[in-house]
Image (cartoon, helix red, strand yellow):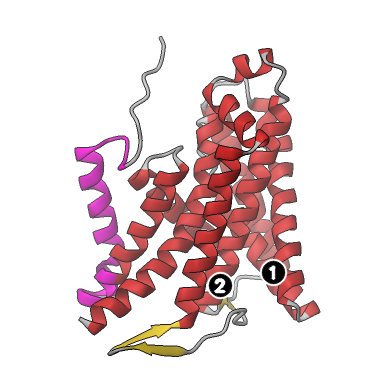
Amino acid sequence: MEYFLSQLVNGLAIGSVYALIAVGYSIIYGILQLMNFAHGDVYMVGTFIALSLIVATQSVFVTVVLASLAGAMIGASIERVAYRPLRAAHRAAPMISAVGAALILRNSAQLMWGTKTYHFPSLLPSRFIHLGDVGVSTLSVSIFVIALVLMTVVGITVQKTKIGMAVRCVSQSIPTALLMGIPVSKIITVVYAIGASLGVAAGILFATYYNSVFIGMGFLGTMKAFTAGLLGGLGNIYGACLGGILLGVIEAMSSGFISSAYRDAISFGVLIVVLILKPSGLLGTQISEKV
């Protein structure tokens, strides 16, 4: 039982990081129905920037703020250069453009930092505390709490603020939002910036948890965000939260009680079962398209 609870805490920690990446992914899908394949690579580049900043400044606060701002600028730039000119094109065009943006980011990062895995310093206190017979890592608890706070802030922003109302209007219908005088392009840019900064925050938490940062974490992040989004319901930020946390718990339990070699196979097996039973995901709603 103690081992089960320990694995559960680890699963909640890494699952909350997946959820944070997936929220950034889903918020963009929700507004444009576009698979943003560059999202994982923005998360990777932002984490490398954070590594450079922590080495240069030795300040956690400066590192997190500047890396998140850099992620927001990268996300907004990609939207402006790679997606906006193709907004009226066939849906396949921006998807290919997204893949191209991801490759450019990945190759640029490879030129700057190489292909080796770097040690990432722990930005959060890490020690074990004992709750009865269960040892709990303060690092896991801190990561879970930070991710939960960030996701709550995003949820409140979307539901309770003026800009959140504009985002929901644009996600319902871009032509109607334009008729209502909403600056659609600016709102979409803001959504990309928010999604990218969330991705960078998730990358910093991921690197802190595993004490490493590497080029391949961009592809890994894309796959985890996509899986979590499908599991919870693409385009639904609450579904993304649920899907990410479930994915993390499934992986932790699979690694702890079966084998880490089968972790991904079990996760995708669960995803397939969920999609067979509910194709729109756990919290997704079936949307009918007009023809």
Picture quadrant of residue 101 = top right
Q: Earlier in the sequence, mark 1 or mark 2?
A: 1
The answer to if 259 sits in the magenta stretch is: yes
Q: Residue furthest right?
A: 57
Q: Residue furthest top?
A: 291
Residue 227: % across, % down? 38, 50
- The quarter of the rendered structure image containing the C terminus is top left
On the rendered structure, is 58 left or right of 38? right
Q: Is residue 170 shown in magenta?
A: no
The magenta region covers 253-282
Separation (CA) of disc 1 from disc 2: 10 Å
- The crowd level at tag 2 (other Cα within 10 Å; few <14, some 14-19, many 20+) is many
* Residue at left offset 30%, top offset 43%: 282
Mark sitting on residue 50 = 1
Q: Cβ–Cβ below 8 Å for labels 1 and 2?
A: yes
Up-down relation of residue 181 to residue 23 (above or below): above
Q: Residues within 10 Å of mark 1 (few under 14, many from 20)?
A: many
Query: Looking at the picture, which amino acid does disc 2 mark?
Result: Ala
Q: Report the residue at 77% width, 70% height from top.
A: 62
Count the numbered circles shown.
Answer: 2
Q: Is residue 168 above or below residue 199?
A: above
Rendering coords of residue 223 (x, y %) = 43, 53
Q: Secondary structure at mark 2?
A: helix
Residue located beneath label 2 in the image: 207
Q: Tell me the SS state at disc 1.
A: helix
Prevailing SS of the magenta stretch = helix
Percent of width and height locating residue 198? 60, 54
Q: Residue at x 45, y 76 (%)?
A: 140
- The residue under the point 43% across, 69% down is 13
